[in-house]
Image: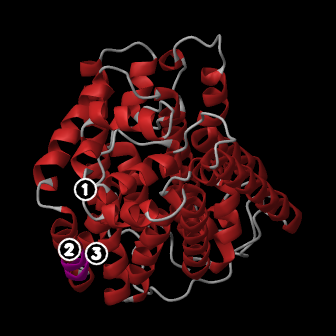
């Protein structure tokens, strides 16, 4: 049997995975699925009541996306990329205040434009259904025996996406399809999915780098062509002024990040960890840069040592979460794809206590923002920036623990370690 850190030249369908040591049962999956349905129903009802003037002032991310679509309909897209103007429109149209500067690339405006044609509650329902379906199907096709394991491990991140109407599930589903293409030789399908993942380009760069490191030139070419074609189409549809609006909006957002304006307690980056512990912006960014260099060097080393494709791809999927200073809890849905890839080896080589520890770590890393957001929203909570951001530290500890587990030889009997 091939060692998970050794070369793997057989990208065929993986063997059935060992049982997940009690982490995944039918009852567990049922309870978690019901929780997802309950949160989705509550959010949908809230959005509907608000749209007819009977709801509260809380704003979800889907409303921000919808508002960009509303601006596109008005021929005022430029205001979405100017934080001051955008916040004023938000107060006027949604009667709420929410700090969410808009910096998405032109391709994402196809989605926001479509959302703007619908009531916000219907846009939420359709985007959520599409994201959940793509995520579930892609996980199932990528790793049939570990889809449930991955779902349980990153459940809090899935819940955050459902509650906020974010695009993390849609993005993770596209990256899962790209990874499947890299493993199974589907250059066109995988490249198309990777190119469409340009709706959040910094999260797709890891898989793109893996495609190059693995020598999958055709898939990389299809991805690049897809990205360029969709970019050109978006510029034709929404105007070439996006080419200077987006860099300016990104620079403005980086200024907000340095000033601590973002909710650091929901961010999963080393930058957020250092800043929330009182470090200066310069020191926090230096720590982020050092980690980025280490992560890129690690990817190159895995490629040079001809690590198993699933290990390299799992590392590539999680790399952006470690490299980018601007990474949120909803982005952790991508980690579910990496865990699905590593699941069989992790289950075969880990002990029950280690699986419980990994589950606890994953829930903290993915869900720390849920209780801290509730605390920050309380009237007497003070500044939300004062709450710690510990997710990056937990993620690094989990990576070290999984590397140690994967370095073990699989039991000759195929069973699990004692």
| 71 magenta-colored | no
Camera-side residue: 225 or 302?
Answer: 225
Residue 201 location in percent, x, y? 29, 58
Label 3 sits on a secondary structure element that is: loop
Q: Quadrant of the N terminus?
A: bottom right
Relative image position of residue 96 (x, y in whole percent): 51, 32
The stretch of residues the image draws in magenta is: 220-227
In this rendering, the answer to whether 87 lies above or below 209 is above
| Number of other residues with Cα within 10 Å of mark 3, as a class: few under 14, some 14 to 19, many 20 or more | some
Which residue is more in the foreground, 389 or 375?
Answer: 375
| First reached walking from the N terminus: tag 1 or tag 3 | 1
Image: 227 above or below 80: below
| Vertical side of 271 occupied by 33: above or below | below
Q: Is residue 56 above or below residue 236?
A: above
Q: Position of residue 286 (x, y in %)?
A: 25, 27
Residue 75, numbered label: 1
Q: In which quarter of the image is the C terminus?
A: bottom right
Give the residue number, with chain letter if any, for mark 3.
Answer: 214
Q: Can residue 9 be seen in this view?
A: yes
Along the polypeptide, which appears first: circle 3 or circle 2?
3
Number of numbered callouts drawn: 3
Q: Report the magenta stretch's main SS.
A: helix
- At numbered mark 1, what does the secondary structure look like: helix, strand or loop? loop
> For this rendering, which residue is in front, 402 or 22?
22
Residue holding disc 2: 233
Give the SS element for disc 2: helix
Residue at the location (45% across, 85% down)? Answer: 11
Locate residue 214: give its quadrant: bottom left
């Amino acid at each position: 049997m091939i060692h998970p850190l050794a070369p793997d030249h057989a990208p065929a369908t993986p063997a059935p995975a060992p049982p997940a040591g009690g982490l995944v049962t039918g009852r567990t999956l049922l309870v978690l699925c019901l929780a997802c349905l309950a949160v989705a129903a509550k959010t949908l009802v809230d959005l509907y009541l608000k749209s007819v003037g009977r709801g509260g002032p809380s704003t979800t991310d889907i409303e921000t996306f919808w508002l960009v679509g509303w601006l596109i309909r008005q021929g005022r897209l430029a205001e979405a990329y100017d934080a001051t103007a955008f916040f004023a429109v938000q107060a006027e149209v949604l009667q709420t205040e929410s700090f969410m500067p808009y910096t998405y690339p032109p391709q994402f405006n196809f989605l926001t434009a479509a959302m703007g044609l619908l009531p916000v509650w219907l846009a939420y329902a359709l985007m959520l259904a599409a994201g959940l379906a793509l995520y579930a199907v892609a996980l199932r096709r990528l790793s049939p025996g570990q889809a449930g394991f991955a779902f349980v491990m990153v459940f809090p991140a899935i819940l955050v996406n459902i509650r906020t109407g974010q695009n993390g599930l849609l993005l993770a589903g596209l990256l899962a399809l790209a990874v499947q293409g890299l493993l199974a030789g589907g250059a066109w399908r995988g490249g198309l999915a990777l190119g469409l993942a340009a709706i959040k380009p910094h999260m797709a760069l890891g898989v793109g780098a893996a495609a190059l490191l693995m020598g999958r030139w055709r898939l990389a070419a299809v991805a690049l062509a897809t990205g360029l074609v969709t970019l050109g189409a978006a510029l034709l549809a929404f105007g070439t002024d996006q080419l200077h609006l987006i860099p300016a909006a990104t620079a403005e957002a980086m200024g907000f990040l340095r000033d601590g304006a973002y909710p650091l307690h929901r961010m999963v980056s080393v930058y957020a960890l250092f800043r929330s512990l009182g470090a200066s912006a310069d020191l926090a960014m230096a720590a982020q840069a050092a980690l980025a260099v280490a992560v890129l060097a690690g990817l190159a080393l895995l490629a040079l040592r001809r690590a198993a494709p699933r290990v390299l791809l799992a590392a590539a999927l999680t790399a952006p979460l470690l490299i980018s200073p601007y990474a949120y809890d909803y982005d952790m849905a991508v980690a579910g794809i990496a865990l699905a890839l590593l699941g069989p080896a992790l289950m075969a080589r880990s002990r029950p206590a280690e699986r419980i520890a990994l589950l606890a770590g994953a829930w903290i890393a993915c869900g720390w923002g849920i209780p801290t957001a509730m605390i920050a929203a309380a009237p007497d909570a003070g500044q939300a920036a004062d709450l710690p951001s510990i997710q990056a530290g937990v993620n690094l500890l989990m990576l070290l623990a999984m590397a140690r587990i994967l370095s073990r030889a699989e039991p000759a009997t195929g069973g699990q370690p004692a």
